[in-house]
């Protein structure tokens, strides 16, 4: 952490918890009688409340998207490279809202929250939530903030699914949707990866059918394995090869089961760190939300028919080495938008980092993203 904050940082930020007393009916048929959402905001809302941008997070994301919580914090928010003065999402021009979704484990109501019916944490009894449920709760958040229409809803990966769902659930409440490194639905292979990760968690002896809190336990080994599997899919073969190659940690064969290659040590570190900060039931919940997302399902599997409900303009971005959500999936979405006569801009960006490329600033990515958001900002100023 530098002695002073970078000039393009949003600076010190403080999350706030917003409580909602009105019931929220979920797609699964259950109802949350009340709930909390943890939110951070950056920049200033203009007089007519037309410059608001919503940031939707991915699987392991949360509300802390930019800036620092303290001068001692070593790393800024997870998308600090794209949010701040002079950055693609310019906080000199936009009022930016970032939240932790329902079912999360960073302060919003989720499996680790207290169930009002029992007085104990929800655990596995927390209802299944979908991307549509998240968007419904985000619409309630917009109401609370007095935002009738977002200038843009922006997200990468699972966040991109939310941006897409916004355009279908509330077509009049956003002017632009930015869908980055995402997909209109998971392939069977992607669902399979998620199932392996879930099985790693549920097979952990410390899982206790999701009631590990009641046993003062945590399924850390399962979470660690789930994160290791997921992390492999987020990176490309080329990026892993460039970063680690086949380097041994020590110049000798050990013939054992400890981490001998650098990549093994890296994955174990990532898994261990994740298992200390993320809730297992939340992981199960959010991967299921990924699996279930399919806006074409209610339109006889006709994605173009689904997209005909949208009224906003779209920016869709994909990355050449993303084999988790390949450019082909983005192109499928763009073709459906074109067939539905929606306005869409699309680019496939050549980047070596796989799915994680949406988190890493590169010149072409930043240029395209910035140019599009400049247009959004100019519309607000008119």
Image (tube, rainbow, N blue to C red):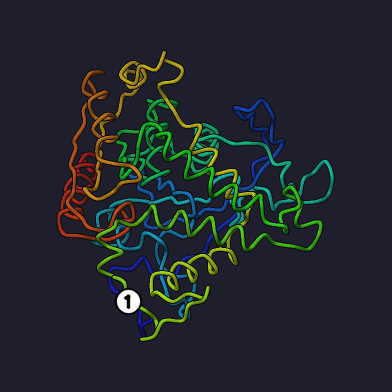
Rendered image quadrant of residue 168 = top left
**Residue 99 x %, y %:** 50, 50
For image coordinates 70% across by 62% down, the residue present is: 218
In this view, 250 is above or below 158: below
Q: Of 18 and 209, which appears nearest the observer?
A: 209
Q: Nearer the viewer, residue 366 or 196?
A: 196
Q: Position of residue 230 (x, y in %)?
A: 45, 53
The residue positioned 40% from the left and 74% from the top of the image is 261
Q: Residues within 10 Å of mark 1 (few under 14, many from 20)?
A: few
Position of 156 relative to 175 (above/below): below
Horizontally, residue 95 falls left or right of residue 363, namely right
Instruction: Residue under label 1, please give it.
Output: 247
**In the rendered view, would you say 159 is above or below 149?**
below
Query: At which x and y percent is residue 181?
Result: 31, 45
Give the farthest residue toward the right: 118
Residue at horizontal 25 percent and vertical 40 percent from the top: 327
Q: Quadrant of the C terminus?
A: top left
- Whether residue 62 sits left or right of residue 109 in the image: it is left
Query: Picture coordinates of residue 257 (x, y %)?
Result: 53, 73
- Secondary structure of the residue carrying numbered label 1: loop
Image quadrant where one finds the N terminus: bottom left
């Amino acid at each position: 952490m530098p002695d002073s904050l970078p000039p393009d940082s949003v600076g010190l930020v403080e999350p706030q918890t917003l409580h909602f007393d009105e019931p929220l009916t979920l797609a699964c048929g259950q109802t949350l009688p009340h709930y909390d959402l943890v939110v951070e905001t950056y920049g200033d809302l203009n007089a007519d409340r037309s410059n608001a941008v919503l940031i939707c997070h991915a699987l392991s994301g949360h509300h802390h998207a930019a800036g620092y919580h303290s001068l001692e914090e070593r790393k800024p928010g997870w998308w600090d490279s794209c949010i701040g003065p002079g950055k693609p999402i310019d906080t000199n021009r936009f009022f930016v809202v970032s939240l932790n979704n329902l079912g999360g484990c960073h302060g919003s109501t989720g499996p680790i929250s207290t169930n009002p019916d029992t007085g104990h944490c929800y655990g596995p009894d927390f209802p299944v939530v979908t991307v549509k449920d998240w968007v419904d709760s985000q619409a309630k958040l917009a109401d609370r903030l007095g935002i009738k229409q977002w200038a843009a809803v922006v997200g990468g990966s699972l966040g991109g699914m939310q941006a897409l769902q916004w355009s279908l659930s509330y077509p009049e409440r956003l002017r632009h949707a930015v869908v980055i490194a995402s997909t209109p639905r998971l392939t069977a292979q992607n669902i399979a990866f998620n199932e392996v990760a879930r099985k790693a968690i549920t097979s952990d002896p410390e899982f206790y059918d999701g009631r590990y809190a009641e046993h003062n336990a945590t399924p850390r080994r399962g979470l660690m394995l789930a994160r290791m599997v997921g992390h492999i899919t987020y990176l490309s073969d080329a990026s892993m090869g460039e970063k680690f190659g086949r380097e041994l940690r020590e110049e000798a064969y050990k013939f054992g089961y400890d981490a001998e290659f650098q990549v093994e040590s890296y994955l174990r570190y990532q898994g261990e760190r994740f298992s200390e900060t993320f809730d297992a039931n939340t992981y199960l919940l959010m991967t299921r939300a990924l699996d279930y997302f399919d806006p074409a399902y209610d339109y006889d599997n006709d994605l173009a028919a689904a997209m005909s409900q949208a009224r906003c303009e779209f920016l869709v971005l994909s990355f050449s080495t993303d084999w988790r959500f390949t450019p082909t999936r983005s192109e499928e979405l763009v073709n459906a938008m074109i067939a539905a006569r929606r306005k869409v801009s699309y680019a496939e960006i050549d980047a070596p980092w796989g799915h994680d490329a949406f988190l890493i600033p590169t010149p072409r990515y930043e240029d395209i993203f910035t140019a599009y958001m400049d247009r959004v900002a100019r519309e607000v100023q008119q």
